[in-house]
Image (cartoon, coloured by chain):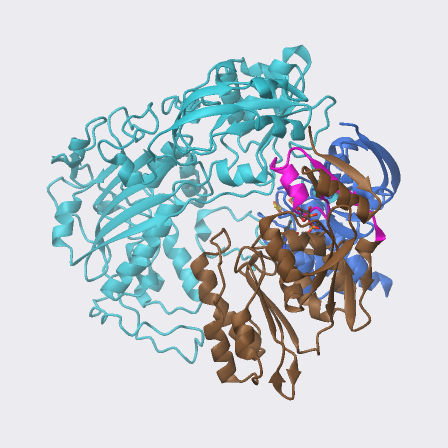
Chain colours: A blue, B cyan, C brown
Amino acid sequence: MARMPVQFRLNGSDRAVFVEPAETLLGTIRRGLGDFAPKFGCGQGTCGVCTVLVDGEPRLGCLTLSVTCEGRSIETASGLADGPTLHPLQAAFMEHFAAQCGFCTPGMLMAAKALLDRNPNPTRVEVVEAIAGNVCRCTGYEPIINAILAAAQQRGARRA
Amino acid sequence: MLEFRKDLFADERDDNLNVIGKGEQRQDMLGHVTGRTRFFDDHGFDGLLHLKVVRSPHHHARIRSIDVTAAERAPGVKRVIRGQDVPLNKNTLLSLIDFGKDDEPTLAVDKVRYKGEPIVAIIADSEAEALAAVKLVRVSYDPLPTVFDVQEALKPGAVVVNETYPGNYFEYHDKYDHQKLRFGDVEAAFRTADHVLEERYQMSPIEHASTETNGTIAAPETNNRYVVHSCAQGLFFSLGTTAKILALESNRLHFIGGTVGGGFGGKVDSLTEPLAVLGAILTGRPVRYVLGREEEMQFASPRGAERHVIKDGVMRDGRIVARQITSYFDAGAYTRLTSYGVVKCVAHMPGPYTIPNVRGDAYCVFTNRVPATAMRGFGVTGVDFSIEVQMDKLAHLVGIDPMEFRILNAYRDGDMKAHRRVAHNTALIECVQVVAEKVNWPLSETARRASSLSGGGGPRAAIPPTVTDESGRIGRPETRQAPPQLTPGAAPLPAHQPRPAVPVYQPPPAHQPAAALPNYPAQPADAAPLPAPAPPVPNAPAPPQHGAARFSSVFTRRR
Amino acid sequence: MPVNVRIVQGLQEAAGILASDRGAQLLGGGTLLVRDINEGVMTEGTLLRAVDPVLLAMNTGGARVELGAGVTMAMVLASRDLPYLHAAARGIGGPAVRTTATIGGNLFAATPYGDFTTALLALDAVVTLHAGFGGARVMPLVEMLANRARGGVGLVASVGFSRPAGADAFRFVKVARVRPKGVSVLSIAAHLPQNGGRISGARIAYGAMGPTPLRAKAVERVLEGRTLDAATIAAAKSAALEGTQPATDAIASEWYRREVLPVHLGRLLAGETS
Ligand SMILES: Cc1cc2nc3c(=O)[nH]c(=O)nc-3n(C[C@H](O)[C@H](O)[C@H](O)COP(=O)(O)OP(=O)(O)OC[C@H]3O[C@@H](n4cnc5c(N)ncnc54)[C@H](O)[C@@H]3O)c2cc1C
Ligand code: FES
Ligand code: FES
């Protein structure tokens, strides 16, 4: 089968890659472009460890075909930090013990970023809703919810 | 909030423990939040091939023929692996510690024993091509009768699941069809007990469902070695298993792991390592074998089902005088680690309680289910759950508060456990006391003053005259009802002397602390009246002990 | 041959390919199709990606609403004109599913999926279909779903319906055992237009109570011309199960679905939250 060319922006850099026609965005980002931050956990849309942002919207890398991402801007957890400076979400996840094995963390962070970018001051219910598609089997969700709320607060404080 | 109760066992430790209750950053956290932590699948390889397996659609069937010609010719397919390509196509995990017989093939050859058993492996350029070729493998089967219930499987004449163990049970000590525990004389104690309570507890299988599925990437390395990125929880255990199955010197395998995307016991079986390495050997290329979510949920080993039948004899004053447990562990079609879980279960049968007469029979049973494996508190969680539910029922039966009931029966330092280990560092009494305090649960004066450090040992350290038997000889189901024999006990009790009673139960003061303790739930109205208070038992002063010595006993006296 | 993807501009062309190539399927958001590829269920054939702007059109301002089949659940949620559809859209997966899952795909999602379709059924929606190389035609959704059960429907370009009578006239509930997100035990949508205090033209639809989302015609008959009082609700509850054919799956047993449906219907009609 003829491979197809795709170009998109990944964490701020323009990338071009040849993909299998039915290749998933997750496969392209990981095996094609070498960014292993988003994970494979199910390939069914049920776990959220593959969550990335496409034009700022949360998307499941495992259910999105790469050919549909032509010209889009894609963000993964690898691009969260600003150089050596952690994103407030990353710092809050560290502070609040919001990861144990760490496998769900990159997806969880991106789901949280999608929320805070749109809604800098979420309620607890909104945080829960934002990560409703992300499974964590180790930590328990409380530390994660607390970390996201703390990150929002901290960003609010910085803006003020 | 986390709190370090230094008042408990204060003289038992050096006062230099200063981490509990404080925040400490984990060393791997930065990697997790930056997405830099590398799990087994997070390694790039040029020319990576992908492996997928053909699985049995039957729970039990004879394989008549396997035709891989179409799959071999399918686009992208680099290699098809069959059972005969596996150097040692029969293994059992615990053979590494010399426990059990090899009973499980890496790829089934003549028979499948559970639904989902791997039969053929396909290696192709892409996952999609491997999946497409899997559909082209033609296997023809003669379905066989199945058995799914543990007790059915143990009946004479039951369908034989796994020919290595033709009685459908794991063989313990080359002698018995179950693991035994014998301590004292339960039958005699049941006869004198005020109440006897028998209950049955059934646990379902549980899938670990870690977010990362099982998987491995293996690739040829320098010096004729293979590098193996593995999800294994026990990396060197997996290395040993892989080396054995592939008949390789272990120094030709370079295992890299340690970052596990959730295991909970579900990543100790080397489900993917041997085939991935074999694939790398046969193709000379890096090979990736990762289970899909459906495979993980349906066919990767779960915590197996357990059934526990518990019969307890209890006195009106609350002392448990006899316990008999018969346990059935559903191993599924192959042993994996269940045989070992059963041994751990047996050690837990009395629970953290001192019971003078205990009898346990635990079976590791083969059925046509997915083979089971370890999961958090392996071999122990199910029986402990059952025991604690049973404890509540017993407390209710004799009309004693369940917390008091546990303190009354709790083991204390120096007590002899039924599996003939002396109890050390016991702390159940203190745990119950602290819990009671935290939830404002009133305890009697006696219960509040009880201590793990006192009242144990002495006569309670004795091994009583014990009734043993030869029931359940391998291959002879009729011996399951073999007659008992008496084996003399051991010091410090002369064999003929009756075992002294455990401390007498002291009922709590009448419960009326409603004003002070608003959260305390009402006592059940149907509880039997409490026994008349007995005179207080003087608590023997704790013998002076040095803490460090007490804890070091873990390493010196225990094995 | 692994799965191929073809990008086509016009719906007409896509419909033509669908009609002539039995291995071809239209790609909506792909939340179901790509899952099948990942699991090795779909290993060959062609996915058609139609980029016709008609698929993304949203006509929501007037009394008559028209939504392109490619409109996602997130787009529905972002629209201020469609508050009555928000509960149904929000019920579908987590946020990352909703940015991808389309209305068109939901019309074809096998039970127990199809929550959004259930809402559309209660709105008496019609679908604009392209089948083969001919032009478009409009068909009631009920009819399309009946055809779907038999296979071969063609391509859906859009769905249309009249805006519900008032804020309280349209109700939707999804019953799931996992919160906040879980697959449906069942869902119920109710459109209850009133005329002088009496219900006129009620439409009740169920999801996960049959092979496709279905209309509860017996309940609709009970409600017709009556006020929404306790007696009416009791009568509706006793008619609730007529025509249902629920399945047993990993989410719930057939028995459980039958047991709880009348309870949730009663609460929905009474305006209580489930
Ligand atoms: C984690 C998760 C949770 C989910 N939860 C729910 C839920 O709670 N409720 C629910 O209803 N669904 C749920 N779904 C299922 C699914 O996401 C939705 O039903 C969604 O609306 C399907 O749309 P899609 O565009 O992704 O479909 P696709 O996968 O693109 O397509 C599905 C089918 O519809 C066909 N199709 C798509 N568009 C058209 C069209 N315009 N014309 C003709 N045929 C078309 C396709 O050819 C294919 O056969 C869930 C899915 C996931 C992964
Ligand atoms: S891998 Fe994408 S949702 Fe699980
Ligand atoms: S930390 Fe392990 S899955 Fe979330």
Front-lying residue, B218 or B282: B282
Total numbered circles: 0
Q: Position of residue B558 (x, y in %)?
A: 37, 35
- The vertical placement of B117 against A40, above or below, is above
Task: State the image quarter where residue B489 is shown.
Answer: top left
Front-lying residue, C38 or C131: C131
- In the image, is B402 to the left or to the right of B39? left
Task: State the image quarter where residue B97 is shown.
Answer: top left
Q: In the rendered structure, which segment of residues is drawn in magenta?
A: C26-53
Residue at the extreme top of the image, as rendered: B223
Residue visible at 41% across and 38% down in the picture: B554
Front-lying residue, B306 or B113: B113
Q: Position of residue A92 (x, y in %)?
A: 72, 54
Task: State the image quarter where residue C66 is shown.
Answer: bottom right
Is residue C234 highlighted in magenta?
no
Pick the quarter of the image with the N terminus of chain C: top right
- In the image, is A78 to the left or to the right of B200? right
Residue visible at 62% across and 87% down in the picture: C197
Q: Position of residue B86 (x, y in %)?
A: 50, 16
- In the image, is B426 to the left or to the right of B51? left
- The vertical placement of A113 against C21, above or below, is below
